[in-house]
Image: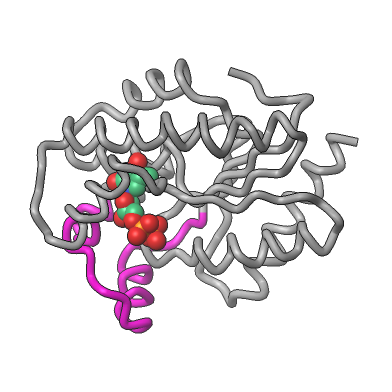
Amino acid sequence: MNTRARGLFIVFEGVDGSGKSTQVARMVRWLGAGGHTVVSTREPHDCEAGRRIREMARSGERVSAEQELAWFQEQRRLHVHDVIEPALAAGQIVVCDRYYFSSAAYQGARGLDPERILRESEAEFPTPDLVLLLDLAPEAGLDRVASRGAPAEPVFEDQERLQAVAKIYRSFAFPFFVRVDASGQEEAVAASLQQIVSERLGLLR
Ligand code: TYD
């Protein structure tokens, strides 16, 4: 599906602790200050499937990779329908924290075929205009998660698993998929991200 000639659809991806939430918030503020109408959203979406996922993450109780994928795709269906599509149709900029690339990377790291997940997702969900991968070594990400004292999500935050996640993320090659080094200072990373988004906004005019 193509979203061009509508709003702009920007997705942030990265391993846990890569700085996504901070950079999403900064990007939303920066775009807003530039006079754009921005919708900031994230997955898992707040719905029944999203709640099941959060519950699973908290309890540490594992379900099959296929079941996990089914839940993520289910919450995504509602998220796209209720939040993303209406905002894009209204010409707004959507900034989304995680999307189907997370399913390909995380459920792929549990043994499912990332290519299959991408193919099925592309057939069903709108293609982003830009995906910003905050690229960071998983051990550095986990250190950041630990140092901010966030509650652990053992289901998703296992170092070996995150190495596999990072490897799958780095294998993605789409024209709209940009890898950004996230190991630097927050300000510097934000500046790189703004530079990339400026170029895309310029193309829209
Ligand atoms: P969340 O608390 O949102 O993590 P973060 O703040 O780091 O983004 O929890 C989302 C977790 O769910 C995260 O570890 C990645 C995982 N996930 C998947 O495994 N598949 C998916 O499709 C999505 C969207 C997230």
Q: Nearer the viewer, residue 33 or 83?
A: 83
Q: Is residue 133 visible?
A: yes
Which stretch is magenta?
Answer: 134-163
Q: Is residue 41 left or right of residue 50?
A: right
Quadrant housing the N terminus = top right
Q: Nearer the viewer, residue 187 or 76?
A: 76
Quadrant housing the C terminus = top right
Residue sitting at 77 percent across and 41 percent down? 200
- Answer above or below: position of 18 versus 42: below
Q: Nearer the viewer, residue 19 or 165?
A: 19
Q: Is residue 130 left or right of residue 49?
A: right
Residue 7 lies in what quarter of the image? top right
Task: Name the spot of residue 168 as percent of width and height, x first.
Answer: 35, 41
Task: Name the spot of residue 131 as percent of width and height, x first.
Answer: 57, 42
Q: Is residue 27 magenta?
A: no
Residue sitting at 48 percent across and 56 percent down? 135
Residue sitting at 64 percent across and 44 percent down? 94
Q: How is the image coloured?
A: one colour
Q: How many marks on residues? A: 0
Q: Residue farthest to the right?
A: 205
Residue 143 lies in what quarter of the image? bottom left
Q: Nearer the viewer, residue 24 or 32?
A: 32
Task: Name the spot of residue 132 as percent of width and height, x first.
Answer: 58, 48
Q: Is residue 167 visible?
A: no
- Answer above or below: position of 200 versus 123: below
Q: Is residue 148 left or right of residue 191?
A: left
- Answer above or below: position of 198 versus 154: above
Task: Name the spot of residue 201 as percent of width and height, x first.
Answer: 81, 43
